[in-house]
Image: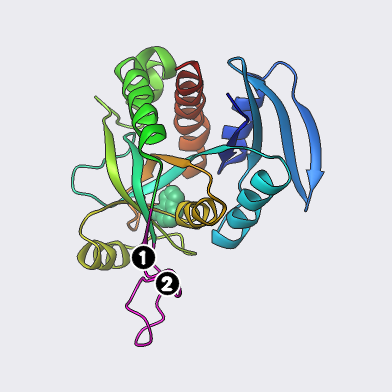
């Protein structure tokens, strides 16, 4: 088995992952700290993705070209768009799309020029394994997170969803904007700021990738409330438990 990249969107998630790595070595490239070591016996390179599509694309490219990873796993948080996608649920991407890509009328809305497509698929086998790992962790969410933390955020019986994740260089924090995205892309389950860029890089470089997101908000007017506390107390714990479960197989 080769080297796998773990890209984390948030400092707290990366810190929690590093705490589980026995032997990580830091390497700094392009202002980014790449942590090379082992997790659950697998050779991994863990790194903060940085926020937004360009920053994440640069990080993903470096992981493949400099660090020779042969698979890439992305973990972070997202705003829920799909009707049944609630705070505390996990969404694993089947496909990813840039919702702010629009070169119309030259190209159809959302189509990435010269690719002839708007959606980039995540690797099916990795995504199914990630879904199974997430389902296993969420089935024991009380153990991984503590019942009190879950209750504090109103989370009961969290679920795992698979489907379309959309990305753009905007934190979506009004009901008007999330409503417009829902109307335009009715099958979108969640919105974030990096996944589709990483999927495009992985497509270009021929490396399989999978993206999982814990739902931190509903991308509406209260999207920013408790955001940091949620990442610290819920998302980073989910993330480490699911990534470790994924790596154990
Ligand atoms: N990541 C977490 N919540 C988000 C939101 N509402 N919009 C964009 N990215 C997010």
Q: Residue at x 78, y 51 (%)?
A: 31
Judge the density around disc 2: few (<14), some (14-19), many (≥20) Cα neighbours within 10 Å. some
Picture coordinates of residue 34, whole percent (x, y) = 73, 38
Query: Residues in magenta?
Result: 98-120
Please, what secondary structure does the residue beneath circle 1 have? Answer: loop
Q: Residue at x 43, y 68 (%)?
A: 115
Tell me, for residue 118, which label it has, or none: 1
Does the residue at mark 1 contact the one at mark 2 (Cβ under 8 Å)? yes
Q: Earlier in the sequence, mark 1 or mark 2?
A: 2
Q: Is residue 79 above or below residue 148?
A: below
Q: Which quarter shows the C terminus? A: top left
Q: Nearer the viewer, mark 1 or mark 2?
A: 1
Q: Is residue 1 above or below residue 60?
A: above
Judge the density around disc 1: few (<14), some (14-19), many (≥20) Cα neighbours within 10 Å. some
Q: Residue at x 66, y 26 (%)?
A: 18
Q: Is residue 100 above or below residue 60?
A: below
Q: Is residue 228 left or right of residue 88?
A: right
Front-most of residues 126 and 197: 126
Residue 33 falls in which quadrant of the image?
Answer: top right
Q: Is residue 135 left or right of residue 197?
A: left
- Residue 216 visible to the viewer: yes
Picture coordinates of residue 98, whole percent (x, y) = 41, 63
Q: Which residue is mark 2?
A: 101
Q: Is residue 249 magenta?
A: no
Q: Is mark 1 within 8 Å of ligand 1?
A: no
Residue 20 falls in which quadrant of the image?
Answer: top right
Tell me, for residue 199, which label it has, or none: none
Secondary structure mostly seen in magenta is loop
Q: Is residue 99 magenta?
A: yes
Q: Which quarter shows the N terminus? A: top right
């Amino acid at each position: 088995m080769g080297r796998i990249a773990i890209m984390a969107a948030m400092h707290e998630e990366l810190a929690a992952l590093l705490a589980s790595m026995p032997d990580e070595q830091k390497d700094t490239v392009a202002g980014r700290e790449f942590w090379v070591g082992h997790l659950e016996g697998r050779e991994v390179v863990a790194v903060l993705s940085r926020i937004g599509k360009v920053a994440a694309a640069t990080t993903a490219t470096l992981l493949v070209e400099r660090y020779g990873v042969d698979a890439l796993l992305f973990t972070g948080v997202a705003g829920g768009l799909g009707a049944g996608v609630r705070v505390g649920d996990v969404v694993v991407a089947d496909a990813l799309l840039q919702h702010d890509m629009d070169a119309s009328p030259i190209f159809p809305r959302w189509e990435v020029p010269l690719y002839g497509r708007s959606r980039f698929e995540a690797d099916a086998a990795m995504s199914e394994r990630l879904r199974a790992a997430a389902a296993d962790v969420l089935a024991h969410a009380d153990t991984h997170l503590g019942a009190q933390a879950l209750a504090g955020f109103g989370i009961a019986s969290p679920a795992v969803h698979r489907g379309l994740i959309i990305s753009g260089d905007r934190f979506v924090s009004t009901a008007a904007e999330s409503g417009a995205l829902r109307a335009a892309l009715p099958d979108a389950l969640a919105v974030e700021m990096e996944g589709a860029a990483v999927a495009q890089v992985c497509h270009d470089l021929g490396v399989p990738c999978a993206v999982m997101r814990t739902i931190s908000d509903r991308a509406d007017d209260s999207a920013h409330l408790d955001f940091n506390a949620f990442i610290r107390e819920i998302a980073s714990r989910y993330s480490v438990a699911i990534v470790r479960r994924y790596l154990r197989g």
